[in-house]
Image (cartoon, grey):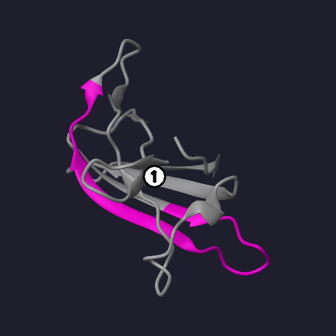
Amino acid sequence: MLWGSQGGTWTMPSVRIVGIASPALVSGTLVLAPDGAAGEVLGRSEHEYQFARSADGTLECHTVAVPVQHAPPRQFEAISDLYGRTATLSITASDGAGRSATSSSSVTLVED
């Protein structure tokens, strides 16, 4: 997790796409692993990104931003209690032709 230069804390995954055109609409969701109940949604984002061709022929974007904060009513509380916890980061990319793909990964939340 990174502290943003304009405020807030963010996770910044790189996203690679195959068979989807650039620009692509990228949606991200970060959900805390549940402790017996439904997981807390720590962040959501949706933004159109330009992707660049990488050496292996895929399209890649290094600037996808998904916020990290407690869900309401705790959204203004510090997030230091999240360090070391596990969350699921889900990314969906779609283009103007209706092609889309979704990927989810388990991540450990650490301060960078």
- Of helix, strand and loop, which one carries label 1? strand
Give the answer, above or below, for where 44 lies relative to 55: below
Query: Residue at point 69% right, 57% down?
Result: 85
* Point 20% across, 41% down: residue: 23
* Residue farthest right in this picture: 36
Q: Which residue is mark 1?
A: 91
Q: Is residue 50 left or right of residue 3?
A: left
Amino acid under label 1? Ile
Among all residues in the image, which is located at the extreme bottom?
73
Quick one: 66 or 94, which is closer to the camera? 66
Which residue is found at the position 25% from the left and 26% from the top? Answer: 52
Residue 111 falls within the magenta-colored stretch: no
Q: Which residues are magenta?
A: 30-52
Q: How many marks?
A: 1
Residue at 64% across, 73% down = 39
Q: Residue 37 lies in magenta, yes or no?
A: yes
Where does residue 62 sit, x and y in percent of width and height? 35, 33
Residue 106 position, x and y percent, is 65, 50
Q: Is residue 17 left or right of residue 37?
A: left
Q: Between residues 20 and 93, which one lies in front from this camera angle?
A: 93
- Judge from the rendering whether residue 51 lies leftward or rightward of residue 39; answer left or right: left
| Image position, residue 51 (x, y; %) | 26, 33
Is residue 20 depicted above or below 34 in this figure? above
Mark 1 Cα shell of 10 Å, populated few (<14), some (14-19), many (≥20): many
User: Closer to the camera, 41 or 8?
Assistant: 8
